[in-house]
Image: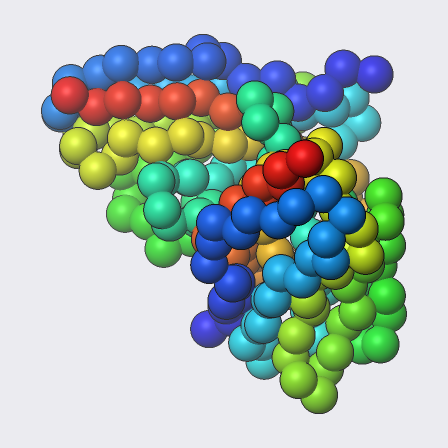
Amino acid sequence: EAGVTQSPTHLIKTRGQQATLRCSPISGHTSVYWYQQALGLGLQFLLWYDEGEERNRGNFPPRFSGRQFPNYSSELNVNALELEDSALYLCASSLPEAGLQETQYFGPGTRLLVL
Amino acid sequence: GDSVTQMEGPVTLSEEAFLTINCTYTATGYPSLFWYVQYPGEGLQLLLKATKADDKGSNKGFEATYRKETTSFHLEKGSVQVSDSAVYFCALSDSNQFYFGTGTSLTVIP
């Protein structure tokens, strides 16, 4: 069974540009989560999508947005990039049966560098 | 809001030593608790979980007990191996989102 996949693996942008990160969940998983893992800060919850709807978002500005497609894959968009957006962005997926009590399966991440 | 506080690292142990990584949490409801592990060059993966008070999660020789009275979920292993070298994350989930600790880096030396 294929795991969670993310693309690209690395992304280099300059301040003010936009970044688009992509995630494909495990087959059969309908929930997708996005996290930011900045150096020394652990994982910070960004967004949670389930069945195409945004269920919750973490404490991030509106320039962080995303969507989930009918095939349950997801995109994370970061507009007006700032230097502090440089981080590893992790996507995870899970089965929906028990909501957030379900185990999350993580992808390898996209490392975003903003210059 | 809910939060997780995790023992800071890095932690360095000799092979066969006893491991404890402390994790305490703050939550208003009845969260589920998790330990995730990130081996070098790999993504995060679930190590163990507990969904209610007094539950004990266990896997690969690691154990953690959900202690509501002390709001803790400490990770323990009786005898660590070199292959246990990784970063360990304590996490909590409530009805709205996941909260992760900052991670504890463990290095086991032969």
Answer above or below: position of A64 versus B23: above
Give the residue at x 77% y 48%. Answer: B16
How was the colour assigned to the protein in this rendering?
rainbow
Where is residue B71, by image quadrant? bottom right
Answer above or below: position of B20 versus B83: below
What percent of the width, then of the height, locates residue B13? 62, 49
What percent of the width, then of the height, locates residue B54? 84, 76
What percent of the width, then of the height, locates residue A29? 75, 31
In this view of the protein, can residue B90 be seen by the observer? yes
What percent of the width, then of the height, locates residue A6? 54, 18
Answer above or below: position of A37 versus A110: below
Give the residue at x 51% y 32%. Answer: A90
Q: Nearer the viewer, residue B33 or B1?
A: B33
- Give left or right: position of B33 versus A91: right
In this view of the protein, can residue A53 be seen by the observer? no
Numbered marks: total: 0
Give the residue at x 46% y 73%. Answer: B1
Where is residue A80, by image quadrant? top left
Quarter placement of the N terminus of chain A: top right
Where is residue B63, by image quadrant? bottom right
Q: Nearer the viewer, residue B15 or B66?
A: B15
Give the residue at x 75% y 39%. Answer: B81
- Give left or right: position of B5 versus A83: right
